[in-house]
């Protein structure tokens, strides 16, 4: 018998998704574009930002996706309100895409649905910030990007998909960032599909 495809598996229902950003939002833009494909299993219903000036908010506006701004200075209270907002929109998947704040253990536990993140290195190497700078400084031969499940420990949850690229002799942090962003714009969506198939 033929294996059911993802949409059959989901009974034709799309996964309501929220994307969290803090800045430029190029990964958000690519996820929105992928989600508009006819057979996409995800529907981006909400864009969350801790920064009301995030450039990426232009993409939610263009696609008429609701935005929700959170103030992470009052983290406990904000996360409580955020959980309510996610619940009201029946969100069952969160994708962090350049979200610069750390979600609390309590939030991750209470959300009860999967939270994914994209990190611009070959995890478990180079967790944390300033990845490209550190990679170039250490004269690494390869770098890449990783999509993983978010766990309470930073950049440490189960890896879903990883893509490796070769670093040239003349690489600097800017050229490396550009190269990696380009692969991320395909990798994140591919990883989401892989993850949903594995459920
Ligand atoms: C990406 O490189 C992503 O891996 C990291 O932050 C960057 C966000 O870029 N977590 P953008 O805001 O999606 O353009």
Image (tube, rainbow, N blue to C red):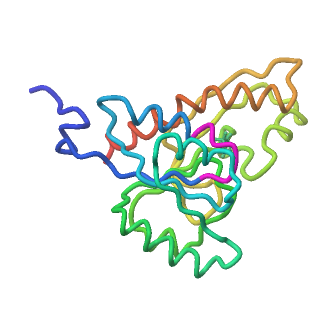
Where ligand 1 lies, by quadrant? top right
The magenta segment = 21-27
Residue situated furthest top in the rendering = 169
Above or below, comparing residue 114 to residue 64 in the picture: below
- For the point 87% across and 18% down, the residue is 169
Count of picture labels? 0
Residue situated furthest bottom in the rendering = 77
Q: In the displayed structure, does residue 192 sit left or right of residue 166?
A: left
Residue 132, image x, y percentages: 80, 37
- For the point 59% across and 47% down, the residue is 97
Q: In the displayed structure, does residue 87 sit left or right of residue 122?
A: left
Q: Quadrant of residue 56?
A: top right
**Residue 90 belongs to magenta span:** no
Q: In the displayed structure, does residue 22 sit left or right of residue 28?
A: right
Q: Quadrant of residue 28?
A: top right
Residue 70, image x, y percentages: 61, 68
Above or below, comparing residue 137 to residue 100 in the picture: above
* Front residue of this view, candidates 63 and 82: 63
Above or below, comparing residue 133 to residue 95 in the picture: above
- For the point 23% across and 46% down, the residue is 13
Residue 194, image x, y percentages: 39, 37
Residue situated furthest left in the rendering = 1
Looking at the rendered image, the quarter that the N terminus falls into is top left
Residue 48, image x, y percentages: 55, 58
Q: Quadrant of residue 76?
A: bottom right
């Amino acid at each position: 018998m033929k294996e059911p495809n993802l949409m059959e598996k989901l009974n034709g229902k799309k996964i309501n998704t929220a994307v969290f950003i803090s800045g430029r939002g190029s990964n958000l833009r690519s996820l929105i574009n992928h989600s508009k494909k006819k057979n996409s299993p995800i529907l981006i219903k909400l864009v969350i930002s801790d920064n009301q000036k995030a450039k990426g908010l232009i993409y939610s506006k263009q696609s008429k996706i609701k935005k929700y701004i959170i103030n992470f200075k009052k983290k406990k209270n904000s996360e409580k309100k955020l959980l309510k907002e996610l619940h009201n929109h029946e969100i069952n998947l969160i994708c962090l895409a350049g979200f610069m704040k750390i979600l609390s253990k309590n939030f991750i536990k209470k959300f009860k649905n999967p939270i994914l993140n994209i990190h611009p290195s070959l995890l478990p190497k180079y967790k944390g910030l300033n990845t490209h700078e550190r990679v170039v400084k250490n004269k690494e031969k390869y770098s890449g990007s990783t999509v993983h499940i978010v766990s309470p420990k930073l950049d440490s949850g189960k890896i879903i998909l990883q893509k490796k690229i070769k670093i040239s002799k003349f690489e600097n942090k800017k050229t490396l960032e550009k190269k990696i962003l380009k692969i991320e714009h395909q990798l994140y969506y591919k990883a989401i599909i892989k993850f949903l198939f594995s459920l």
